[in-house]
């Protein structure tokens, strides 16, 4: 024989039981609290994401703010390099002392310019070893002699980076496979 008094009933199971309305209100409030907690946590996470993004943007803005100026300075660095390349070391030693003094001044100015650019995060692209299309621009393939194919043979123009961004690729010549004739693509 079954007696209904043996089964415990919650107030929600029996709508006529005393406190059923209060229990329903309590459940509604608990649901609302849970939703508000979730909204609060999501809002805090969003604020934290915005803060991180703003810090990153601020850091990048300060790091890359000199990019345009640095690009303009690269022309000056190129002119110093061309001036120094125009007078090879064997001619310098035979040159007049005044000319040597001018060349020494040009070298010192070139070193100071590159050092100052490095202070602001601008550095030359490494051009030793293998050709990297992300950092180098191949302008020609030449016989490599003892260098393996795909290796940089000569640097025509230095490349520069600022932080982890490429300002200008290094223009290089690359050792080609085999020693056959040089082929030039004229379809471009």
Image (cartoon, rainbow, N blue to C red):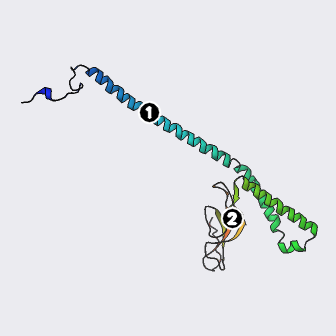
Q: Nearer the viewer, residue 136 or 187?
A: 136
User: What residue is at 38 percent from the left and 28 percent from the top?
Assistant: 32
Residue that appears at 55% across and 39% down: 50
Say which residue appears at 91% left-offset and 72% top-offset: 95
Q: From the viewer's perspective, tell me whether residue 90 is left or right of residue 147.
A: right
Element assignment for label 1? helix
The answer to which quarter of the image holds residue 82 is bottom right
The image quadrant where one finds the C terminus is bottom right
Q: Position of residue 16 (x, y in %)?
A: 21, 20
Crowd class of label 2 (few under 14; some 14 to 19; many from 20; radius 10 Å):
many
Disc number for residue 3: none
Q: Which mark is residue 171?
A: 2
| 41, above or below 134, in the image | above
> Mark 1, residues whose alpha carbon is within 10 Å: few (<14), some, or many (≥20)?
few
Question: Furthest-front residue in view?
Answer: 6
What is the total number of numbered labels drawn onto the structure image? 2
- Which one is in front in this view, the residue at disc 1 or the one at disc 2? 1
Q: Nearer the viewer, residue 172 or 96?
A: 96
- Determine whether, in the image, residue 72 is placed left or right of residue 138: right
Please name whichever residue, 176 or 43, is drawn nearer the observer in this view of the structure: 43
Give percent across and percent down for residue 130: 62, 69
**Where's residue 165, x and y in %?**
64, 54
**Mark sitting earlier along the chain (1/2):** 1
Which residue of the protein is positioned furthest toward the left in this rendering? 1
Is 98 displayed left or right of 113 in the figure?
Answer: right
Image quarter (top left, top right, bottom left or bottom right) of the N terminus:
top left
Which secondary structure, mark 2? strand
The residue identified by callout 1 is 39
| Residue 96 x/y as whole percent | 93, 70
In space, the residues marked 1 and 2 are separated at their CA atoms by 54 Å
């Amino acid at each position: 024989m079954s007696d209904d008094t043996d089964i415990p009933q919650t107030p929600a199971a029996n709508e006529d039981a005393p406190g059923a309305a209060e229990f329903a209100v309590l459940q509604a409030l608990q649901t609302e609290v849970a939703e508000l907690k979730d909204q609060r946590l999501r809002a805090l996470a969003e604020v934290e994401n915005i803060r991180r993004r703003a810090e990153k943007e601020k850091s990048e803005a300060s790091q890359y703010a000199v990019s345009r100026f640095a690009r303009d300075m690269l022309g000056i660095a190129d002119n110093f390099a061309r001036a120094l390349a125009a007078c090879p070391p064997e001619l310098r030693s035979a040159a007049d002392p005044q000319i040597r003094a001018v060349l020494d001044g040009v070298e010192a100015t070139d070193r100071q310019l590159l050092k100052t650019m490095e202070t602001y995060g601008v550095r030359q692209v490494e051009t030793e070893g293998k050709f990297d299309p992300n950092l180098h621009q191949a302008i020609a393939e030449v016989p490599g002699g003892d260098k393996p194919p795909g290796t940089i043979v000569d640097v025509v123009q230095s490349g520069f980076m600022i932080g982890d961004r490429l300002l200008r690729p290094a223009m290089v010549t690359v050792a080609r496979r085999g020693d056959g004739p040089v082929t030039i693509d004229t379809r471009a």
